Image (spheres, rainbow, N blue to C red):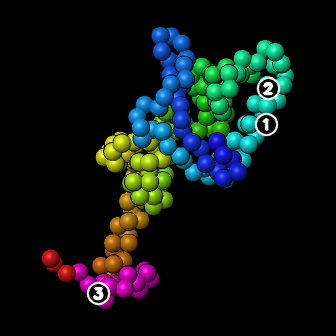
Amino acid sequence: MDLHEGVLTVRQALQRVGGELLIVAPKTQRSARRVALPAECVTALRAQRAQQVADRKAAGTNWKGTGQGLVFTTKNGTPIEPRNLNRSFEALCARAGVRKVRFHALRHTRASLLHEQGGDARMIMEVLGHSSIRVTMDIYTFVRLDSQRSAFDRVGDALRGDDNRPDDDDGAAGVFVAV
């Protein structure tokens, strides 16, 4: 992580192999990628890094971190057991009054929100590390009803020739031509 530049570089993954958690190469070549981080994430990751430094100091010789660059670890530096991560996430959702969702569902949420905010398919595909735009759009995006309504409202504005929309400078504002 480069928290000064606000960029995360994915170079490895944590995977269970033969009952043991191991650091492995990313699943595909596209999975190894750079991802820009929003300012809120950078702030949270700086706090996490400080907490990890404090945990390492408190653990002393019991620190088991191996320098693999893990961002989130247990108090003694080992990888977090995925089941424990899921339990902690469920507890946080319950405390915040958020409906229960699987931790992995956050990928879908991120893709849908990026799409809803105008992110193009290629950018979303690269953020998620997919090899195909089709996978991204078919599986990982969901268009909310209010977004559909907003899009149709804009179509209605165009059909009525409302002047409240930006001019696309094609000389045919509000006029549709059959091709």
| Residue at mark 2 | 55
Which structural element holds mark 1?
helix
Work out how far the residue at label 2 is from the one at label 1, CA to CA, in angstroms: 9 Å
- 166 is within the stretch colored magenta: yes
Q: List x then y, in percent, for residue 45.
A: 69, 41
Q: Quadrant of residue 172?
A: bottom left
The quadrant of the image that shows the C terminus is bottom left
Q: Is residue 82 left or right of residue 96?
A: left
Work out how far the residue at label 1 is from the one at label 3, CA to CA, in angstroms: 58 Å
For the point 23% across and 80% down, which residue is it? 176
- 38 is within the stretch colored magenta: no
Q: List x then y, in percent, for residue 49.
A: 74, 36
What is the chief secondary structure element of the magenta stretch?
loop
Q: Residues within 10 Å of mark 3 (few under 14, many from 20)?
A: few
The quadrant of the image that shows the N terminus is top right
Q: Quadrant of residue 64?
A: top right
| Residue at mark 1 | 50
Do the residues under discs 2 and 1 have CB atoms within 8 angstroms?
A: no
